[in-house]
Image (tube, rainbow, N blue to C red):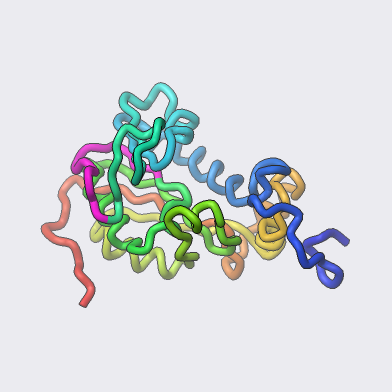
Amino acid sequence: MNVTELPGAPLEPLSRTFGFDRGTPIDRHYIHAFLERHAADVRGCVLEVGDAGYTQRFGGPRVSRSEVLSVAPDRRATIVGCLETGRNVPRDTFDCVILTQVLPMVFDVAAVLRNSRLALRAGGVLLATAPGISQISQYDMQRWGDYWRFTTASLRRLMSMAFPGDAVEIASFGNVRAASALLYGLAAEELSTTELEMRDDDYPVTLTIRAARAAAAPAAFYEPT
């Protein structure tokens, strides 16, 4: 019996840093696999939040220009701005916008998604991930907040408002074993391929979004009443 099985599971996690100190965090395993599947979308002019790590890793020579967005001045940032308000975020500019685990850290998720779409040029692609089942990130909580966890239903509704008429794909990854292991702080290397790759929509660890902005944008966004 291992720590993810009951009874006898410990009351304290093995890691409070998502398993970074043990290997690859389980949610990052799903994020990396998602970006690898859609690596061809990481091309041209790319915007990423925080740093350009995934732009470089998955875009490589397909990327002609890499921009890094930060809400505060940072040595890695090329744009100091805010997707929540749209401040200093260029419009109709990017071929790809990468938002990995950004959505839970902003209060107005709908605004971030709308402004991400506006930042894309026609035919551009948003690649985003969000947590379903996950611990709180104290690093983010203490700086700008950790507000949300998501379901496929919540993301579909948000995306129908932010990307009306565009091609949107939403998927979930994980299962009860992977979710339990993530909460305990185990690393992906400590689970088998079967334990990681089995998908059970009742226990989503990581949710993914691929949205392509249509060549002809709708005249106006849907505004909830």
Residue that extends furthest to the left in the rendered view of this protein: 219
Q: Residue at x 25, y 55 (%)?
A: 85
Residue 182: where, in percent of width, then height?
67, 56
Give left or right: position of 113 versus 98. left
Q: Quadrant of the N terminus?
A: bottom right
Residue in the image at 35% along x and 55% along y: 168
Q: How many marks?
A: 0
What's the residue at 47%, 52% (across, down)? 101
Residue 70, horizontal then vertical, whole percent: 36, 42
Dominant SS of magenta comes to loop
Q: Is residue 207 visible?
A: no
Give percent across and percent down for residue 214: 23, 48
Q: Nearer the viewer, residue 219 or 149?
A: 149
Query: Residue visible at 35% across and 31% down?
Result: 43
Residues drawn in magenta:
85-98
Screen quadrant of the C terminus: bottom left
Front in this rendered view, residue 125 or 104: 104
- Residue placed furthest toward the bottom: 225
Residue 225 counted in the magenta span: no
Q: Is residue 37 visible?
A: yes
From the top left corner, tell me how far across and down residue 71 is, in percent. 34, 46
Residue 88 magenta? yes
Name which quarter of the figure residue 7 lies in: bottom right
